[in-house]
Image (cartoon, helix red, strand yellow):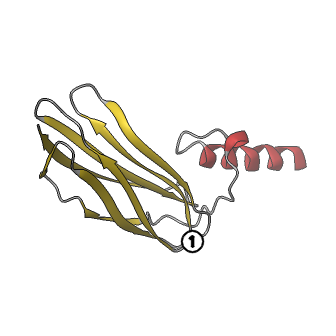
Amino acid sequence: MVASILLIFSMCIFAACTRSGIPLNESPHVINLDDTIPAVVSVDKPTDNQVYATGDTIKVEGKVTDLGLYRGNISISDDANDGILKTQDYEIHGLKEYDFSISYKTSVTVVSNYTVTVWFEDHGLNITTKKVKVRINP
């Protein structure tokens, strides 16, 4: 009976830990299954469809709030080839709010479209993603 209860408990925890695709043995945080509310992510800069010139710096700035944050990532990718131009990981256990910021200096010879992707996950394994499109002119 005790073995059955432990097996069921282990299966529930494993299922929760893999909801975001992270195996249990690689998840160093405490999971809060009562947290069903995703983080709120706001991207203040850049604005959607903002246009830059080559040599300009794209500044990604914003804020994430939640009952208990876990981790996140900001990346800037080239839409033509999905290549990652800049990426920044965050591990911010337990914070309730966090201001994020990264910069990337552009350099293009043809008109290019980039996607800024910001995602954060909380301790309930809820993920919030925001995407902003920008254009860079030569």
Q: Quadrant of residue 108?
A: top left
> Is 45 located above or below residue 4 in the figure?
below
Looking at the image, which residue is at 11% across and 30% down? 110
Describe residue 64's horizontal placement relative to residue 78 as left or right: right
> Is 44 located above or below residue 10 in the figure?
below
- Residue furthest to the right: 2
Q: Residues within 10 Å of mark 1 (few under 14, many from 20)?
A: some
Where in the figure is residue 109, as x and y percent of width and height? 15, 30
Looking at the image, which residue is at 62% across and 47% down? 17
Where in the figure is residue 4, as x and y percent of width and height? 82, 44
Describe residue 80's horizontal placement relative to residue 101 as left or right: left
Q: Quadrant of the C terminus?
A: top left
Q: Amino acid at mark 1?
A: Leu
Where in the figure is residue 69, as x and y percent of width and height? 54, 65
9 or 2, which is in the foreground? 9
Q: Quadrant of residue 50?
A: bottom left
Q: Quadrant of residue 93?
A: bottom right
Looking at the image, which residue is at 52% across and 45% down? 20
Disc 1 marks which residue? 95
Total marks in image: 1
Where in the figure is residue 88, as x and y percent of width and height? 47, 48
The secondary element bearing badge 1 is classed as loop
64 or 16, which is in the foreground? 64
> Is 72 located above or below residue 25 in the figure?
below
Describe residue 93's horizontal placement relative to residue 72 as left or right: right
